[in-house]
Amino acid sequence: MKYQVIGEPMPVVVCELEGGESMITERGSMCWMSPNMEMQTSAGGFGKAFGRMFSGESMFQNIYTAKGAGMIAFASSFPGSIKAVEITPDRPVVVQKSGFLASESGVELSVFFQKKAGAGFFGGEGFIMQKLSGHGTAFLEVDGYAVEYELQAGQQIVVDTGNLAMIDATCSIDIQTVKGVKNVLFGGEGMFNTVVSGPGRVVLQTMPVSGFASALAPFFNTGSKYLPDAPGGGGFRPPPPGAKISF
């Protein structure tokens, strides 16, 4: 399988397959393909399907197999990046919920439970994440741009809530309380940060969906019928024609 990631900020990965090669996607992310791609939908067994549901994905997988040389493309659902990760039996990875986009058929998606209760409650990633194991190339959907670090044994990095996209399964996750009452109340960073300890890779994302939603929240209507003015001007927005106005 050969691939190319193109486009921004809404990227797509275009995969060139040889006859008999297959690709798996969990959420129907296929956006175009050659006519000789054959699709099959499979749950892959009740246990695996149930685990995928808990990890934030669909219970069913779409499997696309090339009947002869073929092409298939998978698109991101949010502005950001598509990161290709090589999965091997000795190097599985753990990713955020809904971070899996597509993979070769040798990659297996399963549920991953946080071992520490504190990290599950307050770390921002939740108790349940996704684990990718097996063998092959997997494509991950990253919110914003992807920044990768390689941690040595005992080395740590402190990450704001929601900015953790992927870690090697050899890494561990814990939480750290923000020190100082003023820092908690007025710092705008919340009460907890996520602490990732090596050894292993850490992939961070610059624009988590939660942060993006919080930034847009002040611009959405929450009570009245008409949107308030956005910063920078714009004036009063008149009601649509025929609308009844009461005072």
Image: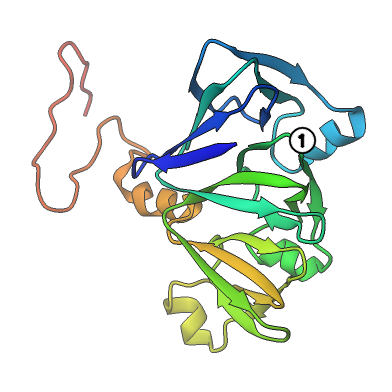
Q: Quadrant of residue 106?
A: top right
Residue 47, given in percent of the width and then of the height, sits at 91, 34
Above/below status of 193 relative to 223: below
Above/below status of 71 relative to 101: above
Q: Quadrant of the C terminus?
A: top left
Q: Is residue 194 left or right of residue 58?
A: left
Above/below status of 145 relative to 26: below
Residue sitting nearer the eye, 38 or 175: 38
Number of on-image labels: 1
Residue sitting nearer the eye, 57 or 216: 57
Say how the picture is coloured: rainbow
Residue that badge 1 annotates: 53
Q: Amino acid at mark 1?
A: Met
- Helix, strand or loop status at disc 1: helix
Q: Quadrant of the N terminus?
A: top right
Question: Residue at coordinates 25% horizontally, 32% vertically from top-left?
Answer: 226
Taking the image as drawn, is residue 99 in sight?
A: no
Residue 23, given in percent of the width and then of the height, sits at 65, 30
Question: Residue at coordinates 55% horizontally, 73% vertically from top-left?
Answer: 149
For mark 1, does the 10 Å Cα neighbourhood hold few (<14), some (14 to 19), or many (20 or more) residues?
Answer: some
Residue sitting nearer the eye, 225 or 72: 72
Q: Quadrant of residue 224?
A: top left
Residue 215, given in percent of the width and then of the height, sits at 36, 54
Q: Is residue 11 left or right of residue 37?
A: left
Q: Is residue 219 left or right of residue 186?
A: left
Residue 131, given in percent of the width and then of the height, sits at 76, 51
Q: Quadrant of residue 240?
A: top left
Question: Residue at coordinates 47% horizontally, 51% vertically from top-left?
Answer: 143
